[in-house]
């Protein structure tokens, strides 16, 4: 089916391209059910057409109560008696929290993702947003909740989804088995911009992951160029710090995403645009035009030069 | 007075037809006159199932078209990535309205409407048992539904999804009126559905052709019986949920607000406990229709009747154990989820039984490939595919990927369009000749089928892939480069293909359908069941005896004999409209039911009811309350003419069978209706108690919460005693109202008058007891739950008071005596229910927290 | 509807009623024990949740089996001359009883596969 479709099944957001153990288990369940279902469908359709078009003497055997008992009662009971335990076993073995798993907390907001990595050994805790980076081969347990309405956390390549419900704490466990870049989305209608609430998922080899984690825990980079320093000054003067954290500066607002290392992220706007000076500038100046309904107002009053400096500063926060 | 069973006088194998020829002069004319339709503008006051049924089906079809147009707009928006044709605001209203209108204003009303028309015809009853009730239900739906749909033209349409999850739909995140339109607009339309369900249960069980015992009932009747019982059990959950959410929005009672002890999952449980059975409620009548059409098309009796009845009853039960499969991703324990996985798997078997029963029937006959047959084949193809993907999503881990993706969109449209829309089109092509002078065009019908069949598959088959490669639901656009573009474009093209088929149908329908007063197109398919007898406003001239499931095939000359008046009740015994009530199992004649005729009361009551709810939505409270009072006045005006008593002595309906024209007690049709109503009320109350217990479960810290004290332990006993006293008084009045001599003892109104303050006092005392502790309904969900229970009880008490006063009024007007006591019985039943509910409420509210020790 | 008919209907539906009670009990118990973290207790060495599911399932199977057997017995004792609805209801009761056994069994399988409250 996939081969026939123009799209192809592989992709950064595809359940048919498993990159982790759970997704793989579910993938095999899917394949078996699809093949089995297709065969049953062909059988039923075939019997129906036979019942209509075959000569009466040839189809008389089909026109009896036995057909119903065998085809409609016995056959489904046998098949489903096999499928149900199989499905329950896959359920048992999927989404199992493992001891020693990497602990990450994600909070769903309208319309972005607040991400917190727990402290572990010498690694310090830190916050980021709209991005999940995980080590390949190591179990991860994501603890989720929501700050406002119900959202849902779904990374198709790595496993199933879990709802993020205000007042409840849910957990999702998975292990990435293949390095790569994937995409997660919100999978529960959460309001105006539900369609534009995604996040990047990066699976790195363990050493690369540790390096990333160490870098994320550090405070923000100092600007090494006056243009960037101007940007930082604009950030401060513009009041951005009342909503955003940039660790190491005075900005400590927790209402919006943590921007300490925003330059290191692949996308901005919750997985919506590539991360570069141009898109950052556009986002700041035209927020409500690009993604109307988000909690950040547009800051259209910056001059062109100021806007570029501000964007360049943010881009420098790697 | 109860009528003794008359087994010796009735024998269906008697070769002599009940009534001899020639029929008396004027008998037929009197029958025609009694059933004459009102003229001119008053035509809208008609209550005859023939007219109400047709209007109802037509209105439902209108909503199908309107909701379909909404989906076309959505598909145009999604045809390309990052399209800005339709903004997010409008799109979110479009998908919410598409789902809401399709599910609430099309799907359930369409199948209910079809039964309003078909069921009496198929059982050779002259009308439904409560025609004014179905008229009321229709007009409330018509007015309310159209006003609700128009909200989209003003940007006021609900936009939180058809499932309306809080907290998104709570006041904080949806401050505008949009959500209220859903809650108040749809809420009362559900009441229409329940009214219809009560009617169908009583109609199926009590108004069948003579000799149409349980084993000879058409499968359609079985399907509608199960359908109606499912509505009675399932709809109260959404009525309660809707009430709770509206109270949260309007009065800040935090049922679903986590910060104050509430839980968003409570809504989901209530919604889906209704929502899952809802889809089987939509599907089962369609299977009933298919089970009638297939034998006619194959010209052979249905094979596997008992297995099909098993399948219908099994689906009815099992469908209530599925609801959490809509919540597989909510983080509930896997063990809990697995119960629903098991039941969701089990429910596939009954569907399999039915599919194979139809295949076996087709194989044993000669299936003519008419348009109805084509739609049946299309149904089997599409529904089977949808059913198989349903088994897939019943496996929780697969659902963890597929949930809220386009895979589910594919699944649900396959089962709903395949399982309900295709049978509906088959039914339209099949049964139009009963209602119309001309059948529809077979030639055009093939095109309609072809376009719709191809269109459905082209639209929805790709969506299975689209969903599994990552596209979530309810998105107004999607990014470039995800690989979804071509699939979405194909789906859009398919959608317009379906639209072309439907448009072609509308054209052909407009050209050919002409309401037949007394000359319909006839039994063009040579079918075997009773709706194909010659009929007119009064349905059949006389009510036949049946000895098998296909009477027209097995009883030669049946049509002629029925038309000549050889069977039962060929005229009118009381001069007015009547139908025959028969026993529920054996279909022996029991009594003649005096059926009400046209009137303004149901129409006006419906308009004022609709106005009450709709004005409340826009917060015009005074005007709304006025309309509410007017609605109640119209209902009382309507009821005043009912319960006519025995207007004449028992009548000979033919064959020496003499039955009364009035009955009371448990044989009476309105007693049955009250019992069903009590089940509905009981389910609303059960869901409320469930909500209370659920909130306890999610508040482990303390229950009641810190700082809240329970009322003193003696209070519930005071209220309880007052309730019991009022019940005893009513029971005593019932005792007094006995005797064949039509006595009217003064004790009766006195006892009722004494019971009124007792029941009112009991409820007021409970309210006062809670209020005195300082309990606030908005501080914590505990208070909200307690006051919700108290408020529900107050509503029932107020209704009981009105019924009690009304009963006293009837006694004063001489319309109540020991024989003519149906009104009293209805009041008594409702009263006992109110008392029972009140006592259980006291036990839970005062007893449960003490039982759990405050935790 | 008299007492005899009520009894007949209840016998006919016994299997599904048993399923409905089994379902309600096991779901309510699982939700409450897991929701309040009282599931740690064991009964005869088996986790309390699984034990209650097993016990409820066995009880429901027994009721459904009785429904099946009594319906079959009723059907056999009704002769050819018996009223059609009576024969119909006993046959339906047997079908329902038999099918319910399968469903009740499926409903209890999770106790063997899944951990109590994960």
Image (spheres, coloured by chain):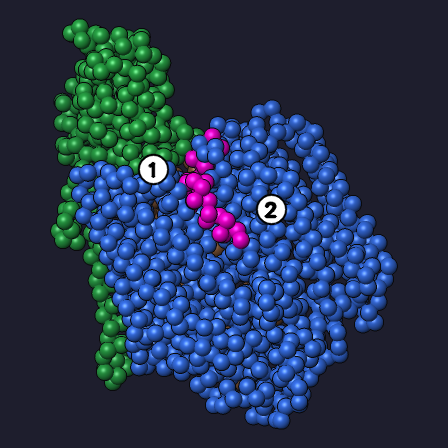
Dot 2 corresponds to which residue?
Answer: B612
Q: Is residue A232 covered in magenta?
A: no
Chief SS of the magenta region: loop
Q: Is residue B672 left or right of residue A67?
A: right
Residue B82 place in picture, x, y as percent: 24, 38
Image side of residue A272 versus residue B347, left or right: left
- What's the residue at 75%, 65% (across, down)? B821
Answer with left or right where residue B668 lies relative to residue A97. right
Chain B rendered in what hue?
blue
Q: Is residue A214 visible?
A: no
The circle drawn on residue B88 is: 1
Q: Quadrant of residue B597?
A: bottom right
> Which one is nearer the viewer's eye here, B181 or B581?
B181
Q: Vertical placement of B665 versus B96: above or below?
A: below
Measuring 69% from the left and 84% from the top, which residue is drawn there?
A: B652
Write down which chain is painted green: A
How packed is label 1: few (under 14 Cα within 10 Å), some, or many (20 or more)? many
Residue B530 place in picture, x, y as percent: 49, 79
Q: Which residues are magenta?
A: B143-172
Closer-to-camera residue (B102/A119)? B102
CA–CA distance between discs 2 and 1? 32 Å
């Amino acid at each position: 089916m996939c081969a026939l479709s123009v799209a192809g099944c592989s992709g950064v957001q595809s359940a048919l391209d498993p990159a982790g153990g759970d997704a793989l288990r579910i993938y095999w369940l899917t394949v078996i059910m699809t093949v089995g279902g297709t065969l049953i469908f062909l059988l039923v359709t075939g019997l129906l057409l036979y019942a209509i078009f075959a000569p009466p003497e040839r189809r008389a055997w089909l026109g009896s109560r036995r057909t119903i008992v065998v085809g409609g009662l016995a056959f489904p009971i046998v098949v489903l008696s096999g499928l149900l335990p199989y499905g329950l076993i896959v359920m048992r073995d999927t989404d199992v929290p493992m001891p020693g798993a990497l602990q990450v907390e994600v909070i769903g907001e309208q319309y972005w993702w607040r991400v917190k990595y727990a402290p572990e050994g010498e690694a310090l805790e830190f916050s980021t947003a709209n991005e999940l980076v995980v080590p390949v081969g190591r179990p991860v347990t994501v603890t989720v909740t929501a700050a406002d309405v119900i959202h849902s956390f779904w990374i198709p390549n790595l496993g199933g989804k879990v709802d993020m419900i205000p007042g409840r704490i849910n957990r999702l466990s998975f292990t990435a088995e293949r390095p790569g870049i994937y995409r997660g989305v919100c999978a529960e209608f959460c309001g105006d911009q539900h369609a534009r609430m995604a996040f990047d998922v990066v699976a790195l080899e363990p050493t690369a992951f540790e390096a990333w984690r160490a870098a994320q825990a550090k405070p923000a980079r100092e600007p090494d160029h006056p243009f960037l320093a101007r940007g930082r000054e604009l950030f401060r003067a513009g009041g951005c710090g009342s909503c955003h954290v940039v660790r190491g500066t005075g900005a400590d607002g927790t209402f919006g995403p943590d921007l300490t290392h925003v330059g290191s992220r692949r996308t901005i706007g919750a997985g919506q645009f590539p991360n570069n000076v141009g898109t950052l500038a556009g986002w700041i100046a035209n927020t409500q035009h690009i993604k109307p309904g988000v909690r950040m107002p547009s800051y259209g009053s910056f001059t062109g030069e100021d806007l570029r400096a501000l964007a360049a500063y943010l881009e420098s926060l790697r | 007075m109860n009528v003794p069973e008359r087994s010796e006088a009735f024998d269906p194998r008697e070769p002599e037809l009940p009534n001899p020829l020639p029929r008396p002069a004027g008998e037929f004319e009197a029958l025609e006159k009694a059933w004459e339709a009102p003229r001119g503008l008053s035509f809208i006051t008609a209550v005859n199932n023939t007219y109400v049924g047709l209007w109802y089906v037509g209105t439902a079809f209108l909503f199908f078209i309107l909701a379909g147009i909404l989906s076309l707009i959505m598909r145009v928006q999604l045809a390309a990535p990052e399209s800005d044709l339709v903004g997010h605001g409008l799109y979110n209203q479009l998908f919410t309205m598409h789902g809401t209108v399709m599910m609430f204003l099309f799907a359930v009303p369409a199948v209910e409407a079809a039964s309003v028309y078909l069921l009496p015809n198929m059982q050779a009853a002259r009308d439904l048992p409560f025609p004014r009730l179905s008229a009321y239900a229709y007009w409330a739906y018509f007015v309310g539904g159209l006003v609700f749909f128009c909200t989209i033209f003003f940007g006021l349409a609900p936009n939180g999804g058809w499932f309306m999850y809080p907290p998104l739909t709570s006041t904080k995140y949806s401050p505008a009126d949009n959500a209220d339109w859903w809650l108040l607009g749809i809420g009362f339309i559900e009441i229409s559905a329940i009214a219809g369900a009560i009617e169908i249960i009583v109609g199926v069980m009590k108004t069948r052709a003579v000799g149409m015992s349980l084993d000879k009932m058409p499968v359609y009747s079985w399907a509608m019986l199960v359908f109606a019982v499912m509505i009675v059990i399932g709809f109260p959950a959404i009525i309660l949920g809707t009430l709770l959410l509206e109270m949260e929005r309007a009065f800040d009672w935090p049922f679903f607000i986590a910060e104050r002890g509430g839980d968003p999952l409570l809504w989901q449980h209530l919604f889906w406990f209704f929502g899952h059975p809802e889809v089987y409620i939509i599907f089962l009548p369609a299977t009933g229709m298919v089970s009638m059409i297939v034998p006619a098309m194959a010209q052979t009796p249905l094979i596997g009747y008992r297995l099909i009845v098993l399948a219908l009853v099994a689906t009815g039960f099992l469908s209530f154990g599925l609801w959490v499969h809509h919540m597989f991703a909510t983080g509930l324990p896997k063990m809990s989820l697995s119960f629903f996985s098991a039941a969701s798997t089990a429910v596939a078997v009954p569907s399999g039984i039915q599919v194979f029963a139809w295949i076996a029937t087709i194989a044993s006959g000669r299936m003519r490939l008419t348009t109805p047959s084509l739609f049946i084949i299309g149904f089997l193809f599409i529904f089977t595919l949808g059913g198989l993907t349903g088994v897939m999503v019943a496996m929780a881990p697969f659902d963890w990927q597929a949930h809220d993706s386009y895979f589910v969109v594919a699944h649900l449209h396959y089962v709903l369009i395949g399982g309900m829309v295709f049978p509906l089109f088959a039914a339209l092509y099949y049964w139009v000749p009963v209602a119309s002078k001309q059948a529809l065009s077979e030639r055009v019908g093939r095109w309609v089928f072809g376009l719709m069949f191809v269109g459905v598959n082209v639209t929805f088959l790709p969506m299975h892939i689209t969903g599994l490669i990552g596209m979530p639901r309810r998105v107004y656009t999607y990014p470039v480069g995800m690989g979804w573009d071509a699939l979405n474009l194909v789906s859009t093209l398919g959608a317009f293909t379906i639209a072309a088929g439907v448009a072609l149908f509308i054209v052909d329908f407009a050209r050919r359908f002409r309401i037949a007063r007394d000359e319909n197109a006839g039994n063009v398919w040579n079918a075997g069941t009773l709706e194909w007898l010659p009929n007119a406003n009064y349905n059949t001239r006389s009510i036949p005896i049946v000895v098998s499931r296909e009477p027209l095939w097995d009883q030669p000359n049946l049509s002629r004999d029925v038309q000549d008046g050889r069977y039962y009740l060929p005229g009118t015994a009381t001069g007015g409209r009547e139908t025959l009530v028969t026993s529920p199992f054996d279909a022996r004649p029991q009594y003649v039911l005096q059926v009400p005729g046209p009137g303004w009361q149901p129409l006006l009551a419906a308009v004022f009811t609709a106005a009450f709810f709709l004005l409340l939505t826009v917060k015009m409270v005074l005007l709304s309350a006025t309309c509410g009072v007017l609605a109640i006045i119209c209902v009382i005006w309507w009821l005043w003419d009912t319960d006519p008593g025995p207007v004449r002595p028992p009548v000979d309906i033919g064959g020496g069978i003499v039955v009364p024209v009035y009955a009371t007690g448990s044989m009476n049709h309105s007693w049955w209706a009250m019992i069903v109503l009590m089940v509905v009320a009981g389910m609303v109350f059960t869901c409320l108690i469930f909500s209370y217990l659920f909130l306890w479960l999610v508040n482990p810290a303390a229950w009641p919460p810190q700082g809240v004290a329970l009322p003193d332990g003696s209070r519930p006993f005071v209220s309880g005693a007052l309730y019991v006293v009022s019940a005893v008084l009513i029971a005593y009045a019932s005792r007094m109202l006995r005797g064949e001599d039509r006595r009217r003892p003064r004790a009766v109104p006195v006892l009722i008058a004494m019971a009124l303050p007792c029941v009112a006092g009991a409820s007021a005392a409970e309210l006062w007891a809670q209020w005195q502790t300082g309990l606030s309904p908005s501080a914590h969900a505990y208070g909200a739950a307690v006051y919700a229970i108290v408020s529900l009880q107050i509503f029932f008490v107020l209704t009981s008071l009105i019924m009690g006063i009304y009963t006293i009024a009837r006694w004063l007007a001489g319309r109540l005596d020991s024989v003519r006591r149906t009104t009293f019985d209805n009041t008594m039943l409702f009263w006992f229910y109110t008392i029972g509910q009140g006592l259980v409420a006291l036990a839970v509210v005062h007893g449960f927290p003490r039982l759990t020790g405050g935790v | 509807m008299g007492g005899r008919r009520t009894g007949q209907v209840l016998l006919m539906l016994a299997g599904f009623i048993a399923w409905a009670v089994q379902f309600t009990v096991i779901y309510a118990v699982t939700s409450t024990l897991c929701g309040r973290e009282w599931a740690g207790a064991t009964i005869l060495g088996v986790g309390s949740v699984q034990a209650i599911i097993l016990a409820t399932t066995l009880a429901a199977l027994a009721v459904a089996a009785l429904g099946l057997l009594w319906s079959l017995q009723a059907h056999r004792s009704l002769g050819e001359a018996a009223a059609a609805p009576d024969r119909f209801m006993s046959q339906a009761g047997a079908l329902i009883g038999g099918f319910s056994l399968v469903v009740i069994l499926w409903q209890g399988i999770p106790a063997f596969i899944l951990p109590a409250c994960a």
